[in-house]
Amino acid sequence: MTSAARSRWRHTRRYAAGRARLPRQHQMPENARIGDVQFFPAGPISKGERRMNVREMGLGTYLREISRIPLLTPQEEQQLARRLRLPGKRGAEARRKLIMSNLRLVVSVAKRYLHYGMPLLDLIEEGNIGLIKAVERFNPDRGCKFSTYATWWIRQAVTRALSNQGRVVRVPVYVTDYLGKYRRVVDELYSRLGRTPKLEEIAQEMGLGLDEIMKLEAFSDNVGPVENTVNLDDGGPSGGRDTESEDADEQFRKMEMADQIQVLLSRLCDRDADVLRYRFGLIDGKNHTLEDTGKYFGLTRERIRQIEKDAIAFLRAEFGASAHDFRFD
């Protein structure tokens, strides 16, 4: 593990201890290791729920082992989440089960970032940090599914690691998703046109300005090629494109983005969340002016502007650069 990764891991432990709502005995101890999710004693560990350490087990063994762990229903996740705050073994056991049953979710998210220059093993380790953070911060009373909430934190941990250590040049976290879309659009245009697409054509296809496309091209050149990424299904490199899978992935990304917006808004009070939903078209699909929003809620234009400003500032302070993904401003 690099010194930067160790430093980030120590920071994560301190962050979790300071911000988590769990009892102290259930928070990450100082001697916890990255990739290790079996931190706390919770009685005997069953054969199918043994300690999961990616580096000690090896990637192949790790993937086989976590595939045997039963998945939880949404109702079971909610029940376990409510037990997290219990003292002693009951709380620790609930925490362990919630983490173990979602290790496959970490792998699923990590696989989407294989072509950004970081080994899958490292991506999984970073994603596990996000999963642990999600467990320690999840509030079942907010009405959000745990898998949705955890996906946000896993993705946050992975993309931040990529921006910090996985590139020749530093790329802002919120640019990561645009790079993936940029490369897919370039591939699609190349197949359709039979030649390398012009920057203007890429810009038109993505709905971005020419200057933004030029920046993405510069970032893409420094991140590394897309080809020869690992394909977990057959264990070998993947050279060709699967347009059917890419279409499905694109649909999933759209649904995931909507879910992630709801995760962000769940951190706000009900009034502020409703104001942002109405203002930015998350209710009826239509953006509304400050004046229209004020009339809808019976507030002045200036009051709506202040609510919007304060809410967005809170989200950016809470989630860092990732709040830029939703481009509220």
Image: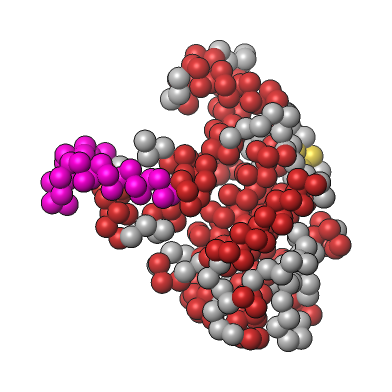
Is residue 37 at least partly visible in the picture?
yes
Give the percent coordinates (x, y) of residue 240. 71, 33
Colour scheme = secondary structure
- Left or right of 270, for residue 155: right
Left or right: where does residue 74 sit relative to residue 226? Answer: left
* Residue for point 47% across, 39% down: 324
Residue 188 shows in the view: no
User: Looking at the image, which is closer to me, 77 or 211?
Assistant: 211
Residue 91 located left or right of residue 289:
right
Residue 85 found in image quarter: bottom right
Q: Residue at x 21, y 37 (%)?
A: 289
Q: Position of residue 56 (x, y in %)?
A: 86, 62
Q: Position of residue 127 (x, y in %)?
A: 66, 54
Residue drawn at (64%, 25%) of the image: 219
Give residue 171's position: percent from left, percent from top: 62, 32
Quadrant of the frame with the C terminus: top left
> Residue at horizontal 71%, vertical 69%?
29
Instruction: Using the rendered view, name the quadrant where residue 159 is placed.
Output: top right
| Total count of labels | 0
Which quadrant of the view contains residue 238? top right
The vertical placement of 47 against 203, above or below, is: below
Q: Does the stretch in magenta take in 327?
A: no
Q: Is residue 105 above or below residue 41?
A: above
Q: Is-magenta flag for residue 291?
A: yes
Q: Which residues are magenta?
A: 287-315
Up the image or down, 172 lies above or below 86; here it is above
User: Most prominent secondary structure in the magenta stretch?
Assistant: helix
Q: Nearer the viewer, residue 153 or 237?
A: 153
Asked whether 39 or 30 is in front, the reply is 30
Residue 27 falls left or right of residue 314:
right
